[in-house]
Image: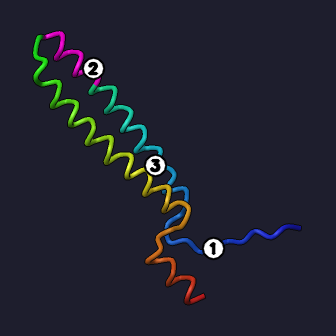
Amino acid sequence: MGYTQSRDRYVPASTWSSLSWSTMRLVTAVTVLALTASMALASMGIPEDIMLVALATVAVLAVGLALVRLFVFLERNGVPLFESDIAATA
């Protein structure tokens, strides 16, 4: 018979996992839309505006990937500020 150590979690790990997957889906969708927009701008003969689309895409990618890293950290470790209080009172 094996032990299953259950730790009290303020927010379940599945919540952070689903937030991480949703963020990755959103980042992928934004990337596809940005590619479509830049191709449309290039075909319309407005190559100057492609740089604005590229900069906005890089910003969205940076924020999205930072959020994914945060959600993975919280999935593994929980919310340290709240869950250290739960462990101390147990």
Q: Mark 2 — residue?
A: 36
Q: Mark 1 — residue?
A: 7
Work out whether 24 lies above or below 44. below
Where does the magenta region start and end? 35-44
Q: Secondary structure at mark 2?
A: helix
Disc 1 residue type? Arg
Instruction: State the scheme by which the image is colored.
Output: rainbow
Disc 2 residue type? Thr
* Prevailing secondary structure of the magenta residues: helix
Q: Closer to the camera, 82 or 53?
A: 53
Mark closer to the chain start, 1 or 2: 1
User: How far apart are the alpha carbons under marks 2 and 3?
Assistant: 24 Å
User: How far apart are the alpha carbons under marks 1 and 2?
Assistant: 46 Å
On the rendered image, what quadrant is the N terminus found in? bottom right
Classed neighbour count for the residue bearing mark 2: other residues with Cα under 10 Å, few (<14), some (14–19), many (≥20): few
Work out whether 69 lies above or below 76. above
Q: Residue at x 13, y 18 (%)?
A: 47
CB atoms of marks 1 and 3 within 8 Å: no
Q: Mark 3 — residue?
A: 20
User: 22 left or right of 78?
Assistant: left
